[in-house]
Image (cartoon, rainbow, N blue to C red):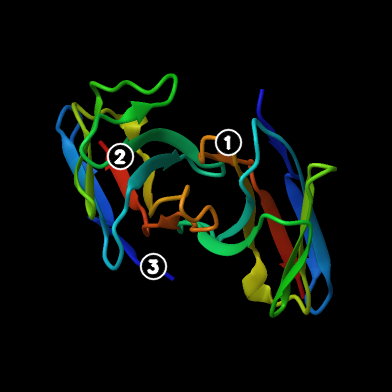
Amino acid sequence: GAVVSQHPSRVICKSGTSVKIECRSLDFQATTMFWYRQFPKQSLMLMATSNEGSKATYEQGVEKDKFLINHASLTLSTLTVTSAHPEDSSFYICSARGNPEASPGETQYFGPGTRLLVL
Amino acid sequence: GQNIDQPTEMTATEGAIVQINCTYQTSGFNGLFWYQQHAGEAPTFLSYNVLDGLEEKGRFSSFLSRSKGYSYLLLKELQMKDSASYLCAVMDSNYQLIWGAGTKLIIKP
């Protein structure tokens, strides 16, 4: 299957600082990238969807000014958690896919996730 | 509204067979996916069904009935490493994935 990488895998930061997480599709061009958050023992929660070269679409309840998403190329998307607070501590997972209209079965491939701990 | 239902938790014995059900109501349908997620890790793709019927892939099989809005994931010859959460997701008419909450499968020796 396709490979999606995420960096960093773990990050610990102080409250009030900003953290940037990178998501890269290594062997295919990702038309769309997704950012999810998962709290312990809970299901995946979609935060936002981003298409290359356009603004991200945020899910209800997700602050776009706090979670900045940049999808600058077909292989890279970044999520910046600005002014992080302890309640932002979570497991952040990105996923990427090609063009589902051309091939609906082309699945979303997930990155390994980034565990964020805000002190 | 859109809705995906699957059991919260299931328990099975090593070497046995288990069936995880998923029912859905979505705006349009462009296929149903099953993912496996081990604790602390990202989901990994297991299967994709868009036509009715059974898709077999090794020890895992996935079934779909579009008229009933129903799918199941069948795991045979269970191994301890199969202990994980299994996520059902449906791609709607806008090609967005709608996720179920996941079924935690516990395998006992």
The Cα atoms of the two marked residues, 1 and 2, are separated by 17 Å
Label annotation for residue A2: 3
Residue picked out by circle 1: B93
Work out whether residue A95 or residue B40 is closer to the camera in this orientation and state it. Answer: A95
Query: Considering the image in quadrants, where does the C terminus of chain A appear?
Result: top left
Q: Name the residue under label 2.
A: A51
Q: What element carries label 1?
A: loop
Mark 2 or mark 3, whichever is nearer to me = 2
The residue type indicated by label 3 comes to Ala
Task: Give, as a three-letter code, the residue at label 1.
Answer: Ser
**Which residue does the image show at 23% across and 21% down from the upper left?**
A65
Residue kind at label 2, given as amino acid type: Asn
| CA separation in Å, label 1 and label 3 | 24 Å
Asked which quadrant contains residue A7, the reply is bottom left
Location of the N terminus of chain A (image quadrant): bottom left
Position of residue B34 measured from the top left corner of the image (x, y, whole percent): 63, 57
Q: How crowded is mark 3: few (under 14 residues within 10 Å), some or many (20 or more)?
A: few
Q: Is mark 3 on a helix, strand or loop?
A: loop
